Image (cartoon, grey):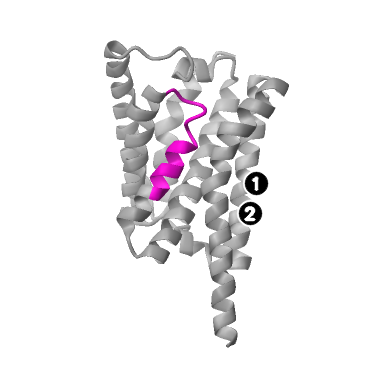
């Protein structure tokens, strides 16, 4: 009876964690940032506060994992990474960073993009250190939420990695809609989100994908104009 109750409590905690992970980032991006942060704060402050809210979400999810589900962080992919795979992640990250840049240069030459939601508009008037913090912060929070927690828990519940990947990817894309225009979402967010999902499923190691994610986004730092 006690085991049944514990299992039921764990399932409730998992459901709460999934709801929080799936909904909170999108609410922050599509509702809180444009309607509450943007009118009240300047650009750099918006980034800091917005990332802070996402970190609060991550903290709550980690508390659910450790004290609600009573599971180790290993259950969401947080494991040691060997030196060999650190170097592999760096190599993959640099390769994907160059690929991302090439895709955006080619797309810029052939596709007319809206003025808002471009790399230039998003990074305008931002200090380089704010963008560096944002790149590192986002790499941790997005991989923990979308790859580590959501993907692992959905695979455990559905026994279907493909369905789990689609749901995780959908949440990942929605969390980017408020900041980037639709062209950037289609040519960068969706394909590279799919790549990161595949890389996580390959290694099931959060530090591995965090390193890669950081390197892909690192060029944003050099676009800072503030």
Name the residue rendered at 45%, 18% in the picture. Answer: 118
Structural crowding at the residue carrying mark 2, measured as other residues with C-alpha within 10 Å and reported as few (<14), some (14–19) or many (≥20):
some
In the picture of the structure, the residue carrying the numbered disc 2 is 60
Residue 79 in sight: no
In which quadrant of the rendered image does the C terminus lie?
A: top right
Structural crowding at the residue carrying mark 1, measured as other residues with C-alpha within 10 Å and reported as few (<14), some (14–19) or many (≥20):
some
In the picture of the structure, the residue carrying the numbered disc 1 is 56
Residue 102 in the magenta stretch? The answer is: no
Left or right of 39? Residue 101 is left
Q: Secondary structure at mark 1?
A: helix
In which quadrant of the rendered image does the N terminus lie?
A: bottom right
Q: Image height check: is 220 above or below 214?
A: above
Residue 142 in sight: yes
Residue 173 in the magenta stretch? The answer is: yes
* Nearest to the observer: residue 4 or residue 197: 4
Left or right of 43? Residue 151 is left
* Nearest to the observer: residue 208 or residue 138: 138
Q: Tell me the magenta residue range.
A: 167-181
Name the residue rendered at 64%, 23% in the picture. Answer: 44
Q: Give residue 28's position: percent from left, percent from top.
A: 60, 37
Name the residue rendered at 69%, 21% in the picture. Answer: 39
Q: Give residue 187's position: percent from left, percent from top.
A: 32, 27
User: Outermost residue toward the right?
Assistant: 40
Q: Image height check: is 84 above or below 180?
A: below
Q: Give residue 149's position: percent from left, percent from top.
A: 48, 55
């Amino acid at each position: 009876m006690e085991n049944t109750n514990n299992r039921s409590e764990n399932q409730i905690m998992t459901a709460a964690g999934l709801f929080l992970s799936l909904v909170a980032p999108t609410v922050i991006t599509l509702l809180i940032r444009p309607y509450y942060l943007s009118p009240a704060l300047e650009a750099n402050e918006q980034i800091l506060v917005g990332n802070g809210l996402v970190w609060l979400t991550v903290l709550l999810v980690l508390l659910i994992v450790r004290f609600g589900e009573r599971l180790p962080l290993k259950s969401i992919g947080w494991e040691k990474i060997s030196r060999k795979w650190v170097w592999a992640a760096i190599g993959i990250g640099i390769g994907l960073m160059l690929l991302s840049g090439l895709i955006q240069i080619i797309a810029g030459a052939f596709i007319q993009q809206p003025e808002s939601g471009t790399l230039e508009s998003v990074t305008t008037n931002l200090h380089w250190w704010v963008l560096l913090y944002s790149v590192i912060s986002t790499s941790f929070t997005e991989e923990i939420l979308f790859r580590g927690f959501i993907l692992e828990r959905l695979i455990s519940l559905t026994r279907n990695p493909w369905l789990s990947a689609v749901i995780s990817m959908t949440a990942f894309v929605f969390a980017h809609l408020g900041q980037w225009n639709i062209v950037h979402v289609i040519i960068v967010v969706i394909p590279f989100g799919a790549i990161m999902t595949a890389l996580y499923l390959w290694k099931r190691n959060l530090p591995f994908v965090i390193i890669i994610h950081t390197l892909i986004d690192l060029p944003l730092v050099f676009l800072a104009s503030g």
